[in-house]
Amino acid sequence: MLETLPRVAAPVVSTPPAARRRSSRRIGALVMIETGAGRMPAYTETLPRVVGSVQRARRLVHLALEVWGLVDVQVDAELVVSELLTNAVLHACRGDSVRVTVTRLGEGRVRVAVVDLSKDKPVPCDAGGDQESGRGLGIVEALSGGQWGVDPLPWGKRVWATVGAEVVPGE
């Protein structure tokens, strides 16, 4: 269940006028997503299924984590969204768009997800030292501590990964 809240503009700090015009575009929508742990805030955006969207997805994740004060997980979450979206661009043979979502799960944890129209599940592979590709899901596995997966959907799939340390009460 998604409840749409106002769109959020990218923060602009001391940038030249031309750059300010580009940076002030609206980035994603803030929504509340129902999870197993209750309603959680999330930023989400539909992007074209093209290589150029990887940068926009990284920006969405970066801004969301900045707003939430979760800068400790920014680099990992941006890399995860890059790998998941690149897989969707290269391997999802259906549809012209993808949906990127970053959900705050709690103190220091986020879930990054990419939805595409392909029902084919991603398969990790062992890339050799001389191969230029094939390491994406291994990177996702490492950065998420193995907390990633695929949710089949009637029209495709959602590939997600959780980034950040789980806070244990009393520690």
Image (cartoon, helix red, strand yellow):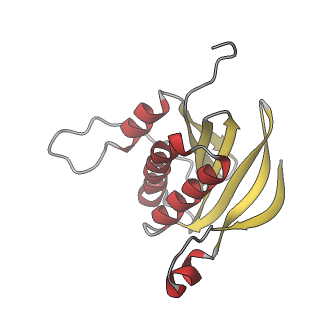
Q: Position of residue 59 (x, y in %)?
A: 53, 61
Q: Nearer the viewer, residue 106 or 18?
A: 18
The C terminus, quarter of image: top right
Is 72 situated above or below 17? Answer: above
The image quadrant of residue 91 is bottom left
Q: Nearer the viewer, residue 124 or 105?
A: 105
Is 86 situated above or below 27? Answer: above
Give me the residue at 69% from left, 55% from top.
43
Say left or right for 153 vs 86.
right
Residue farthest toward the left in the current orientation of the protein: 130
Say left or right for 131 vs 114.
left
Is 60 situated above or below 23? Answer: above
How many numbered marks are there? 0
Residue farthest toward the bottom in the current orientation of the protein: 18
Give me the residue at 46% from left, 60% from top.
89
Say left or right for 103 vs 135.
right
Q: Position of residue 51 (x, y in %)?
A: 42, 66
Q: Nearer the viewer, residue 109 or 37?
A: 109
Q: Position of residue 131 (x, y in %)?
A: 19, 47
Give me the residue at 83% from left, 60% from top.
5
Give me the residue at 63% from left, 41% from top.
152
Residue farthest toward the top in the current orientation of the protein: 170
The image quadrant of residue 21 is bottom right
